[in-house]
Image: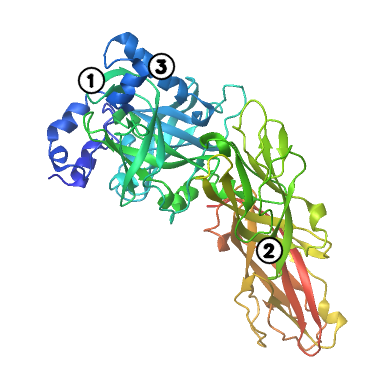
Amino acid sequence: MQTTKTLASVAAVSSNQTSHRSFFIPTRLIPTLLASAVLASSISTGAFAVGVSDAKYTELGGSLSNENTVVRKVYDHLKAISLEPRFEAVGRIVAGGALCTATWLGNDGDTAFIITAAHCVAGDNKSQESSYTGQNISFRTGDGRLVASGVSTNHFIGYNGCQSDLAILEIPLLTNPISSDGSAVPQPIYADDAKFNGYVGQPMTLAGYGRQGTPSLGGLSSGRAYGAANVTQDVGGCLRNKANTEDAWAYAAPGDSGSTTWQWREGQFVGMGITSWWAGWGSQYSGHGRVAPHQAWVKRIFPNINTVTRSRTLTESKAVELKDVEANVKGTVYYLAGDNVSGPTNRKWAYPRGYTPLTVPMVNQTTGGTHNIVLRSQRQTYCGWGEINNGVYCYPSASKGSLKVWYNASDNQAAPAGLYKSTFSLNAKGWHDHSYNSAINLNTSILVDGASHIEGTVTQSSAVTTVRYDNTVNGSVYYLSEGETTSDATRRVWHGRFNTWSTLNVPAVNRDTKEIQTVTLRASRYAGCGWTTMNNGVYCSNGAKYGQLRVSYSAEDNTSLPKGSYDSLFNIAGKGWHSSFNKTLTFKLALEHAGQ
């Protein structure tokens, strides 16, 4: 049996292989398929995509025939589905001689970020985490629009098989992807929970390019197509799909290389795999590497990727909205309170109106305390938004069910200032389909300004220096961190070392991703004859009438912090060394971090 590495090297498109067409490698499948070098050589002569079972082909076309009218009847139908709004980020790349499917992730300035398979693009060290610049690549969406083209930078996680057959491309942006209604295409959502293991036995959706065919007829035509599949195995992070049931009738084939595979998860269409290999028309097998285990790397390459966690995190200014939860459920869906939240516990059927309040205990990262924060929530029907536990639907159908949860400051006027973090869940239940019962996990990163006195705002270019608190007390003052902010200054000290500082690790929300990250700041106290650590109570011989605290940002302390805009409130306690002085000082952080 040939090794996975040997087979992968056959498929790889190296930096000087510009005329090779992409194809798939059947790694560790049925031994008779793996051992056949003829398979690799035969499929390299053409590009294929989205094979369908003989039964599905007959159902859609009326007969198992290769006549052009039958082929077009089947695949025009599948192409039309592949052009629906949920697939608008899906397109095709041309990389030298390789023709592969790929998906637009989003833009950063004048650069488009595209995800595809590692074996589709050039790289001189793909087996390790690496980047390669120099290959000309173009990307078109389903409407034929040329979105990005030019010299690409190709990033690899370390391509050693299906589970790591992943590349992210940076290509010069020409124009933004446009939806069929003329609006901007929203960024697709990708799975980012590496611990999630609920793939096997679940439906999976395919959409790719190339030739098309069936087990009995072989290759028939070419073009874009949709397919319904099912995950039958998860082998070390490679999801295997077998097209052999009424509901799972499609499998990927070579022209689908690099295509994203999708799953519906509680109202979101989520990218969860990247297509890597097939095992021939007759096998009806294909393999797809999971994306979630590589999310730390993906977020380093493209910090603004849209993920399940990010799309389900609400801030004080941006709601969470999950669209069309009822799209794949028979009848309507309603919502009840789940974990870590007080809310409705019983369903009802009435004309939709108003909203449902939810009370969620949240940890204030600024103070360290836990407080109840009130949120508002609604469920959508064809006759408007209303209470989330209301299962009613209006004409023409029950295919709405969007869930919206948001924060309103007027509900939380007594909440202490701070950055609030929490995770809670709502239970989505089918009114007509009693078997549908799914927990929807939501997150919060809510910044509440409150009425606290702010000492000042730390930015990327300006520090904050407080007043001389020693002036107001008997003796000197030192400082310690409070709440969830940590520091290397954990207790008071008395020493004569100057021109130094303490570190502060401050929880802050990234405004682009909604995630809470740790920003490192510097804090030092003026002792009259120099700046020292903030917890140092020493003072010089001319008296303890100094004691200002200075807090600043330095980029060199934050090399691992993702690029983005960061906001926070954080507390530092001022304490008297010789007196009972004890004062909480509140600072604001408003930072533009450029990243590496």
User: What is the C-alpha distance between the residues marked 1 and 3?
Assistant: 18 Å
The image quarter in which residue 424 lies: bottom right
In this rendering, position of residue 151 left or right of residue 463:
left
Q: Is residue 48 visible?
A: no
Q: Which residue is rendered at x = 54% and y = 34% of the image?
A: 327
Residue beneath label 3, please?
76
Residue beneath label 2, please?
361
Callout 1: SS: loop
In this rendering, position of residue 90 left or right of residue 409:
left
Badge 3 crowding class, 10 Å Cα cut-off, few under 14, some 14 to 19, many 20 or more, is some
The image quarter in which residue 98 lies: top left
Badge 2 crowding class, 10 Å Cα cut-off, few under 14, some 14 to 19, many 20 or more, is some
In this rendering, position of residue 249 left or right of residue 371:
left
Q: Which residue is rendered at x = 46% and y = 24% of the image?
A: 81
Q: Hey, which residue is sitting farthest right in the picture?
A: 472
Horizontal and vertical percent position of residue 116: 39, 37
Horizontal and vertical percent position of residue 313: 61, 50
Is residue 5 or residue 389 the one in the foreground? 389
The image quarter in which residue 115 lies: top left
Q: Is residue 546 above or below residue 358?
A: below
Name which residue type carries label 3.
Answer: Asp
In the rendered view of the protein, which quadrant contains the N terminus?
top left
Q: Which residue is rendered at x = 72% and y = 73% of the image?
A: 572
Residue 217 numbered tag: 1
Is residue 208 or residue 387 the one in the foreground? 387
In this rendering, position of residue 159 left or right of residue 489:
left
Horizontal and vertical percent position of residue 448: 75, 58
Q: How many marks?
A: 3
User: What is the C-alpha distance between the residues marked 1 and 2?
Assistant: 60 Å
Is residue 504 or residue 228 the one in the foreground? 228
